[in-house]
Amino acid sequence: MNAIETQKLTKTYEGKGGCQDITLTVPKGSIFGFLGPNGAGKSTFVKMLVGLLHPDSGSANILGKPIKGEEARSKVGFLPENFRYHDWLTGEELLFHHGALFGLSKEEITQAIPRVLRQVGLRDREKERVGKYSKGMQQRIGLACALLPDPEVLFLDEPTSALDPLGRIEVRDLLIELREQNKTIFLNSHLLSELETVCDGIAIIKKGRLVFQGDWRELANKAYRVKVLLGPLSQEQLAEIHRLPYEVLSHHIRSSELVTEGRQEFLFSISTDDIPNLTRELIKANIPLYEVTPQIDSLEKLFIDYVKEA
Ligand SMILES: Nc1ncnc2c1ncn2[C@@H]1O[C@H](COP(=O)(O)OP(=O)(O)OP(=O)(O)O)[C@@H](O)[C@H]1O
């Protein structure tokens, strides 16, 4: 079953900005990364899904229920970006306030509070005023608010931007724990190195339009490269390498004391399927071959390439 399905979902602001014709599928029990440059339309899209904006056209379902209805929203948690909390409330009072907004009873909220405080690592800090919390703690209490109704689908907009590296790891582990409970997490983040460690699927939006959706590793494979250590090489062998039907992206003598002089490093642009062919060709040409190392690009690099190209 899909947690989120949208069909040509569109919202513009008097014909400008926003996002257009977004058809997207997010499987249940996955962590899904939603990426795009500033102003691409990410918040507009998420706000429609959580019921804060009405679409101009198109449709969307959450867990099979149309987003227009309350039923879809009852299973949703949302952490907006840069949310300002009521400074004068204690963490506990804030959680009570949010619980009431979700329509939870007093007993339900009292039961949920220790769970969410544990999940976000704020136990024993709930009696302090939110205004006295550090930025990271404010982000954690926001996450706790989103987790209060034990949501099936969680929308998180930059959930770790104020956290230190340890805090980020804690949130990442929490997301993995939630996924293990078959919850779905829709994650909006600019921290791509963080996304690549947890996301099952991603979508990229640019200027309001979807330009990619799928497994980011699929995206990585599009730009597959392989590093090969060869040599020493005669002029003839060097010419032979350049005659191969694979693009040489770079070629240099590796400056490592461990590498015998004369060995050279080549970076080829080839698909995974072509690696055996490349090695066969090199051996056929009697070229000494020492290393073949596939280079998988980081999500960050691919994202930049994709957003520039698409
Ligand atoms: N209330 C609004 N009125 C007019 N234009 C808006 C409004 N909200 C957003 N826009 C425009 O719609 C486009 C998409 O904005 P949106 O906030 O959805 O992008 P985003 O991808 O979330 O950006 P960021 O990463 O900077 O948060 C932008 O061009 C923005 O200027």
Image (tube, helix red, strand yellow):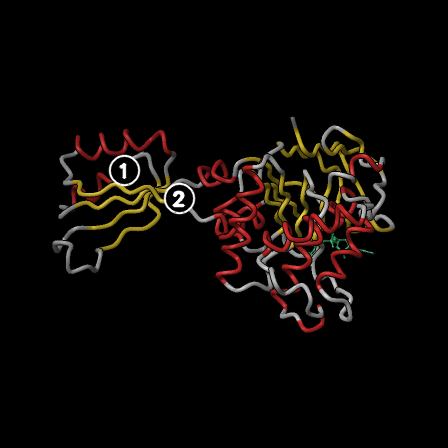
User: Image quarter for residue 162?
Assistant: bottom right
Quadrant of the frame with the C terminus: top right
* The one of 243 and 20 positioned closer to us in this rendering: 20
Image: 267 above or below 24: below
The amino acid type, in three-letter code, at marker 1 is Arg
- Which residue corresponds to the image point at 59% horizontal and 44% vertical from the top-left? 33
Query: Alpha carbon of mark 2 to alpha carbon of mark 1: how far?
Result: 25 Å
- Residue extending farthest to the bottom is 132
- Which residue corresponds to the image point at 45% horizontal and 49% vertical from the top-left? 298
Residue linked to disc 1: 243
Q: Is residue 179 left or right of residue 95?
A: left
Q: Residue 178, image x and y in percent? A: 58, 42
- Which residue corresponds to the image point at 82% horizontal and 51% vertical from the top-left? 100
Element type at mark 2: loop
Image: 252 above or below 149: below
For marks 2 and 1 on the same chain, the one whose residue lies earlier in the sequence: 1
Q: Is residue 292 left or right of residue 257?
A: right
Crowding at label 1, few (<14), some or many (≥20) Cα neighbours within 10 Å? few
Kindly identify which numbered label has been placed on residue 204. Answer: none
Element type at mark 1: helix
Q: Residue 197, image x and y in percent? A: 48, 47
Residue linked to disc 2: 296
Image: 79 above or below 236: below
Determine whether the beta carbon of the residue marked 2 sits less than 8 angstroms from the nearest atom of ligand 1. no
Q: Residue 8, image x and y in percent? A: 76, 34
